[in-house]
């Protein structure tokens, strides 16, 4: 169950999950949270290009009022990861369907296999082709009075009308300022009755084409210059954009965008409650299906779709009289091919276990058994535990080839009692990928498996190096794992600190011994702790 340290030559990896969520903003993350809380395995793939990235704040989201979009995503991703769902920064290049379900191809060659797909890729804004306008997009150029209108109050607001839909928000703008100009750039006739209503209310109405949006030397919005050379002073411009549904990844399953009834957007038609499309198992959430949603209702839509997909999967499993573990399927898929590791023990584990008096040992997340084999050769009575049946088959075969007896236990470290209440003199976990849970169940189970007087050895990849790589993601080279969704060494340390009688003997970052596991030098974080008698 251990994940190998990824480096530039890592071969293409195929992951297996219940649900792949494509798009990691409000709708996609809300769907992932619902699904992961129903104990579904979820991978979110996000290109890192949120539509509201230019904005410094988001508004009208109860509980998050005024928060920056980046801060909101940080909080939302942490909540999703706390239930073991993974958020990968990368790009989906194609989605296809076969007898096994959905095949989601990622940039860089990795693949996610999923029983269901939630499409939450959202929209792309197309601004009117007016020089200087895009420079202020998301700041002084806004698209929604509810999202950013309050911040423009009492200033010089220009409503740039490019379609009949552009007339709809104008009454709201009149509530925000006395200095309002309606500039009809195109899309509306000069004798439109609604324009006369505005004139009668004292609103300045100009029917002319905008030539340029002008900024001052500091880059602040100053005015709009018209084709005849006259100008309109402006602090804020409200403009309706043309909205394009992001459906490119789904061409392979036949999903297309159609014209929205408003005439200013394309969208994906879907069931309004479940988000189900005509493609069985493919659901859409958020603005991809409902283009006019703000962030709060987009999150609500994602939450609703996530719950409906959860119900759909639960019914399917009930009818099949099954309760499959997608995490087991994921790792079984990993072990379906050739041997992944050298068979050598992890060098950091060898360094910490050498000199301990052999007794009963539990190797959690045993993988192909390199550590378990080495411990048995040192005289330990070893039990190898892993979520993958295929991994344990490899451990058993390797043990038989060497004339060793190793017990095999298939179990999920996050199960209620994965080790049947048995305690061991030594418990090891090297690079074991346990999905996080808010209650830290996997950590509790591992600590409880250590007998009084026994030793715990945990070896993990250096989180500093992994965080540094994640801080500068390349969406065109998707990393196949999200290390932040798995139990970290710091989680184990924190749990030990809450227990009486435990002593941490080693907790340090060090070079991995060369040659023990790989030919490339990386860093480990090594923890050795002893439980009191």
Image (cartoon, rainbow, N blue to C red):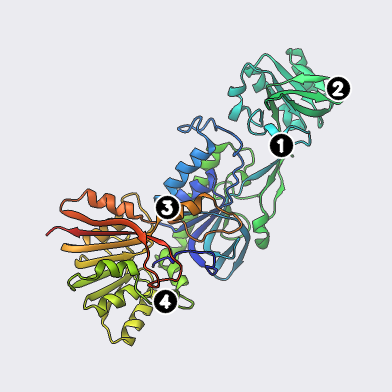
Q: Residues within 10 Å of mark 3 (few under 14, many from 20)?
A: few
Going from N to C along the chain, the mark reached first, 2 or 1, is 2
Q: Please report the residue visible at 34 percent of the width from the left and 87 percent of the height from the top.
A: 401
Q: Earlier in the sequence, mark 4 or mark 1?
A: 1
Q: Quadrant of the C terminus?
A: bottom left
Q: Foreground mark, 1 or 3?
A: 3
The residue at 33%/62% (across/down) is 459
Residue indicated by mark 1: 241
Of the image marks 4 and 2, the number of the one nearer the N terminus: 2
Of the two numbered discs 4 and 2 in the rendering, the one whose residue sits closer to the viewer? 4
- Mark 4 to mark 3 CA distance (whole Å): 25 Å
Tell me the number on the disc at residue 287: none
Q: Report x, y in % for residue 306.
A: 49, 50
In front: label 3 or label 2: 3
- What residue is shown with label 3? 464
Q: Is residue 296 above or below residue 447?
A: above
Q: Is residue 38 visible?
A: no
The answer for how far apart the CA atoms under marks 4 and 1 are is 56 Å
Quadrant containing the N terminus in the rendered view: bottom left
Q: Is 98 in front, or is 151?
A: 151
């Amino acid at each position: 169950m251990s994940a190998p340290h990824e480096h530039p030559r890592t071969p293409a990896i195929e992951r297996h999950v219940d649900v792949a969520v494509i798009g990691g903003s409000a709708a996609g993350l809300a769907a992932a949270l619902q699904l992961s809380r129903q104990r579904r395995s979820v991978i979110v793939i996000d290109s890192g290009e949120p539509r509201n990235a230019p904005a410094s704040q988001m508004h009208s989201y109860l509980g998050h009022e005024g928060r920056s979009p980046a801060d909101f995503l940080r909080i939302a991703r942490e909540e999703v990861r706390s239930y073991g769902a993974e958020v990968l920064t990368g790009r989906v290049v194609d989605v296809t369907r076969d007898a096994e379900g959905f095949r989601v191809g990622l940039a860089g060659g990795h693949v996610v296999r999923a029983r269901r797909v939630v499409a939450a890729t959202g929209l792309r804004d197309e601004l009117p082709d007016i020089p200087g306008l895009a420079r202020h997009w998301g700041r002084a150029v806004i698209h929604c009075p509810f999202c950013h209108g309050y911040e423009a109050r009492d200033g010089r607001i220009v409503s740039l009308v490019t379609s009949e839909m552009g007339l709809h928000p104008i009454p709201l703008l009149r509530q925000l300022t006395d200095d309002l100009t309606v500039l009809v750039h195109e899309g509306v006739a000069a004798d439109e009755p609604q324009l006369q209503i505005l004139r009668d209310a004292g609103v300045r109405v100009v029917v002319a084409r905008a030539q340029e949006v002008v900024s001052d030397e500091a880059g602040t919005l100053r005015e709009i210059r018209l084709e005849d050379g006259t100008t309109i002073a402006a602090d804020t411009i409200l403009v309706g954009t043309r909205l394009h549904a992001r459906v490119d990844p789904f061409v392979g399953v036949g999903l297309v965008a159609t014209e929205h009834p408003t005439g200013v957007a394309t969208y994906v038609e879907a069931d309004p409650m479940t988000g189900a499309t005509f493609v069985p198992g493919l659901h859409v959430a958020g603005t991809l299906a409902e283009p006019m949603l703000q962030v709060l209702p987009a999150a609500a839509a994602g939450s609703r779709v996530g719950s409906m997909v959860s119900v759909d999967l639960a019914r399917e499993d009930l009818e099949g009289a099954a309760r499959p573990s997608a995490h087991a399927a994921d790792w079984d898929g990993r072990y379906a091919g050739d041997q992944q590791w050298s068979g050598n023990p992890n060098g950091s584990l060898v360094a910490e276990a050498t000199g301990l008096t052999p007794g009963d040992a539990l190797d959690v997340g045993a993988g192909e058994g390199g550590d378990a084999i080495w411990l048995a050769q040192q005289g330990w009575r070893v039990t190898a535990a892993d979520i993958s049946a295929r991994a344990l088959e490899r451990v058993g075969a390797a043990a038989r080839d060497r004339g060793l007896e190793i017990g095999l236990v298939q179990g999920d470290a996050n199960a209620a009692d994965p080790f049947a209440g048995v305690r061991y003199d030594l418990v090891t976990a090297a690079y074991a990928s346990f999905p996080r849970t808010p209650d830290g169940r996997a950590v509790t189970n591992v600590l409880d498996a250590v007998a009084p007087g026994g030793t715990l050895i945990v070896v993990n990849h250096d989180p500093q190096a992994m965080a540094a790589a994640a801080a500068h993601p390349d969406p065109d080279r998707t990393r196949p794992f999200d290390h932040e969704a798995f139990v970290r060494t710091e989680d184990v340390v924190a749990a030990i600190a809450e227990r009486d009688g435990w002593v941490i003997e080693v907790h340090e970052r060090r070079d991995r011994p060369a040659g023990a596991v790989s030919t490339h030098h990386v860093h480990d974080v090594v923890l050795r702790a002893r439980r009191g008698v």
